[in-house]
Image (tube, rainbow, N blue to C red):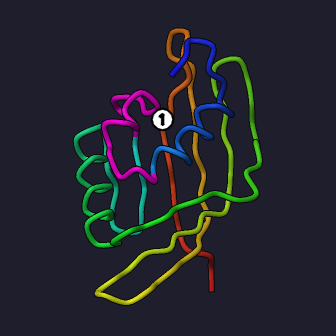
Amino acid sequence: MSMAATPETVMAAYADLINRHDFSLLLPLIAPDASFWFSSGTYQGHDEARAAFERTWQRLANETYWLENLAWIAKGDDAASCTYRFHWRAIVDGLPAEGVGRGTSVLARLGESWFIVHEHLSAYPK
């Protein structure tokens, strides 16, 4: 990621690169101590996040993931946060499946670059 990256460019790159199913491509976008809150659990740091992402990619064959309605709810010189609707489509147990939920990402400027420091994904309330 470029030293001139903005929170917007980090999220755009994240949304693109996540579909390559290679966590090493996401590392330049994620802070080393980032926390991820998913329905499957809470994951802290690169190693735990990598394991969670890779488990998901194994379970959801040919997954495609995308974001919609990204809204920046806070932006400052050193921190920013956005909310969005996420979608996924994949093959699960040999059958087509898809889902939707809501997400929040928090980014921080660390040095001259922006990084994701927290992501929280959840289902919509019933």
Residue at horizontal 32%, vertical 55%? 53
Please give the range of residues in magenta: 19-34
**Does residue 21 lie above or below 3 as drawn?**
below
Residue 111's spot in the image, x, y percent? 51, 9
Q: Which image quadrant is residue 38 in? A: bottom left
Assess whether residue 68 is covered by the magenta stretch: no
Q: Seen in the image, is 81 located left or right of residue 107?
A: right
Residue most toward the bottom? 95
Mark 1 surroundings: few (<14), some (14-19) or many (≥20) residues within 10 A:
many
Residue at horizontal 24%, vertical 47%? 48
Quick one: quadrant of the C terminus? bottom right
Q: Seen in the image, is 81 located left or right of residue 45?
A: right
Q: Secondary structure at mark 1?
A: strand
Residue 94's spot in the image, x, y percent? 31, 87
Residue at horizontal 38%, vertical 68%? 62
- What residue type is disc 1 on? Val
Residue 54's spot in the image, x, y percent? 27, 56
Residue identifier under label 1: 117
